[in-house]
Amino acid sequence: MICSLVLLIAVAAVRISSRSGLPSLLIYLGIGVAIGQDGIGVHFNDVGLTQVIGYAALVVILAEGGLGTKWHEVRPALPSAALLSTVGVALSVGITASAAHYLAGMEWRQALIIGAVVSSTDAAAVFSVLRNVPLPARLTGVLEAESGFNDAPVVILVVAFSAAGPVDHWYVLVGKIALELAIGAAIGLTIGLLGAYGMRHVALPASGLYPIAVMAIATAAYAGGALAHGSGFLAVYLAALILGNAKLPHWPATRGFAEGLGWIAQIGMFVLLGLLVTPHELGDDILPALIVGLVLTMVARPVSVFLSTAPFRTAWQEKVLLSWAGLRGAVPIVLATIPMVAGVDDSRTIFNIVFVLVIVYTLVQGPTLPWLARRLRLGETEPEDLGIESAPLERLRGHLLSVSVPEGSKMHGVEVGELRLPAGAAVTLVVRDGKSSVPGPTTVLRLGDELLVVATDPVRDAAEKRLRAVSEGGKLAGWLGTPGTLKGK
């Protein structure tokens, strides 16, 4: 009963967060605190269980984020994201740890742990905020890829700093990070490609099995990366990225299923982390958290962004926005449980500082990000993507494409014959205002129409590419050089 009530409250809270601009994680953490020891009185102090559930939730969140990331947006951002996730993390750890040691008076080991813990941007926070902030595709790609990549090196650093005995030399840590990233990337790409091939060529007996299979493949990538002593987080993100851009059958249903699991993972993880906190113990840790967070937000993050993006043509406005958009969330709080499980001295203090830091600076950064984007003139509204769902027709060796014509689509006003679909593909049905009709070559398409397109296997990809080209560039797409045409322009 309590779990159901918490879930319903959390779902209702999404509306509040979307209107206020606050990341939903703050509300979920608040729910956990409210039912915890200093609230209703539920006692929970199982750090090990929290860490296990937190890791599992992060796998689901990264998978959902990867499935929703568009390859054409993230591809140009990969070099910048790679540097931010490695060089940027190193710079951030060094600057933040120095502040924790010299300004907050912490021992070097604790300072390094805090520096590593808070240097990772949070995928859940970034993905949820970017849904409501219309940024240019290049910036969205950098932020999404960075949040998917930087968990891996940060986890390695936190585990190394939390281990008993002396910390490895820097070059040993660099070697470990490079090796684990390489293994994770190789496994993620392999499983993603094999999974996409299988999903496109095997007709499952029920459409509801496709979302389950996709999430199972993504989870298998994490397991494979972890078993091979590589980065499971990087593996699951890359595998999901490939699956999300592979034009799989029943994709809208799969995407909706993944989003639902992602929300459940966020709610469960944040409520559990809120339960783990004891608010009356936070008093002495507020000032250190504010100091470390101020240095992290105003010095460490900007320095890492400006230096990591120096090799690329990045405008100063974009660098400023990237600096402010380095949102922290569940990842740092989950990582702060690692030293607690390892028995590091003052690990509870580390956890409390990280918790306060995340709350305060997420409260500051999240709602102000849309305002900053407008002031920097970086807001961008893109037309809604052409909705295409594919179902395999195994016996006919073809595919049935369900196409929705969205607002802003230049397919509005185009005749069916002007689509110029390749031979082997045809529009077989048009549904408008709840009524269906078999179209002729002169049937004019309208916004809101639902089209059923049958395409044979050899021309399936070309047909979808042509439909997207017309949606973006109108009936003259191809003649005007619009990307995604049949000629590959």
Image: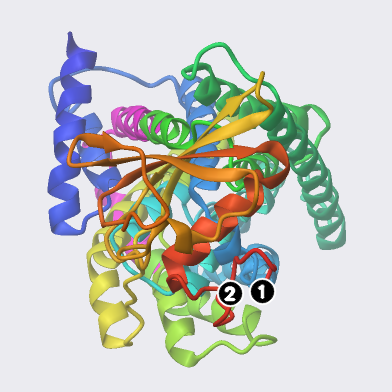
Q: Which residue sits at x=59%, y=80%?
A: 481
Task: Tally the marks.
Answer: 2
Q: Is residue 141 left or right of residue 431?
A: right
Q: Earlier in the sequence, mark 1 or mark 2?
A: 2
Q: Is residue 170 visible?
A: yes
- Residue 426 location, x and y as percent? 53, 44
Q: Is residue 155 visible?
A: no
Above-or-below relation of 75 to 205:
below
Q: Which residue sits at x=45%, y=73%?
A: 473
- Residue 6 location, x and y as percent? 19, 23
Q: Is residue 354 left or right of residue 120?
A: left
- Residue 327 location, x and y as percent? 41, 60
Regarding mark 1 in the picture, which secondary structure is present there? loop
Q: Quadrant of the N terminus?
A: top left
- Disc 1 designates what residue? 489
Above-or-below relation of 408 to 13:
below
What amino acid is labelled 2 in the image?
Gly
Viewer-proximal residue among 113 and 258: 258
Identity of the residue furthest to the top in this view: 1
- Residue 47 location, x and y as percent? 47, 25
What amino acid is labelled 1 in the image?
Lys
Q: Which residues lie in the magenta part?
A: 263-291
Q: Is residue 139 left or right of residue 256?
A: right
Are the residues tagged 1 and 2 within 8 Å (C-beta)? yes
Residue 149's disc number: none
Colour setting: rainbow
Q: Residues within 10 Å of mark 1 (few under 14, many from 20)?
A: few
Regarding mark 2 in the picture, which secondary structure is present there? loop
Q: Nearer the viewer, mark 1 or mark 2?
A: 2
- Disc 2 designates what residue? 478
Viewer-proximal residue among 299 and 265: 265
Q: Main secondary structure of the magenta part?
A: helix
